Image (cartoon, helix red, strand yellow):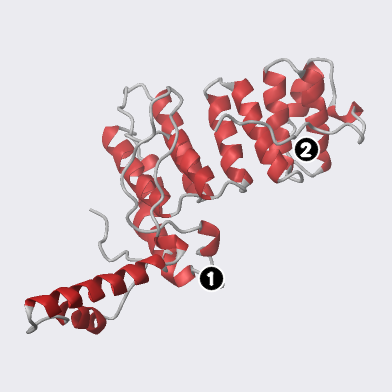
Amino acid sequence: MYPTHYQPVHFGSGYFRSLINLGSGMTPVRSAVAMLVRFSVVFSLLMVLPESASALGWTGTDLNGVRCTGKGQGFGPWDFYDVDEPSDPDYYDGRWWEGKKVHADPGFAAMNDDPFDQGAYNRAAQEFDYLLRAYPNHPAILQGVVQLELKRLKSSRKLAGWQTPPECYLRRAQTFRPDQPHIYQLMGIYLQKLDHTEKAIQFYKRALAANPRSAEIHYNLGLAYFDIGEHLLAAVCGRQAYKLGYPLPGLQRKLERSGFSADSMSDEQQCDYEDSDSGW
């Protein structure tokens, strides 16, 4: 069971006692009026709670067309980029330092257990699930849940999957923060690993539209184009990736073996990154 002290909003206990006691010793009519006053005060307080205290539901379907479902909100949701450092606006309320120690570190440790069995998978999935409900756009945990699923699929042990698949966490993250490119990039990587390469390209394009200066996204898009036989487009994207400083030569070597080269592309040729329909 996760710690019950994760609560994003706190009110003074004395204040709540005064609301609870309001109406005691009164006539039934006056007591009913007092109860209505109490309800209206509490309701007005709830209406002005910060965004992080509001629930974030599950939307859309998984890769098999089944509606995404998962556990309730619990703590959060918090934007990870607002809670990561002490200088961030919600650092103290968001309590990421505690989430890292209590959930993230054990989750990644379980994912790397040897042997990687059902118990290890379940422990990692449980920790990642809690964190992604609390911090829906956390890049390392989103990447962790993708890696965990890919590891499960490759396992010879035929492990049972978690109730919420990675694409549903990514969909939820996109609903929470639709302007953040890492969400689309991770979905593209996940889809490409599952051989849904043409669909992955659409997500890479969305990522690149949000961050056109990313060498890594250019590189991933180039690899995806290469995988579907679009070698010229792969070379154009590769040219941009290397120009932006991407260090790994894998795409260039693939292109050279196929008679193409990223170096032969001109700077005027741009990798296609229009904000295309990603299917969400």
Amino acid type, label 2 = Ala
In this view, 45 is above or below 57 = below
User: Taking the image as drawn, is residue 250 in sight?
Assistant: no
Which residue is the site of mark 2?
241
Left or right: 166, with 87 as reference point: left
Q: Residue furthest front?
A: 29
- The percent position of residue 22, horizontal first and vertical second, equals 17, 81
Using the image, tell me which numbered label, if any, was put on residue 89.
1
Query: Residue 201 sits in which quadrant?
Result: top right
* Nearer to us in this view, 113 or 96: 96
Using the image, tell me which numbered label, if any, was put on residue 12.
none
Task: Please name the residue shown 42% across and 48% down the image.
Answer: 132
* Nearer to us in this view, 86 or 207: 207
Task: Please name the residue shown 78% across and 21% down the image.
Answer: 255
Mark 2 or mark 1, which is nearer to you?
1
- The percent position of residue 8, horizontal first and vertical second, equals 37, 66
The mark nearer the N terminus, 2 or 1, is 1
In this view, 250 is above or below 145 = above
- The percent position of residue 230, horizontal first and vertical second, equals 75, 18
Q: Name the secondary structure under disc 1.
A: loop
In this view, 237 is above or below 125 = above
Quadrant of the snapshot with the C terminus: top right
Question: Pointer 1: residues within 10 angstroms few (<14), some, or many (20+)?
Answer: few
Task: Please name the residue shown 82% across and 37% down the image.
Answer: 240
Task: Please name the residue shown 58% across and 32% down the image.
Answer: 189
Amino acid type, label 1 = Pro
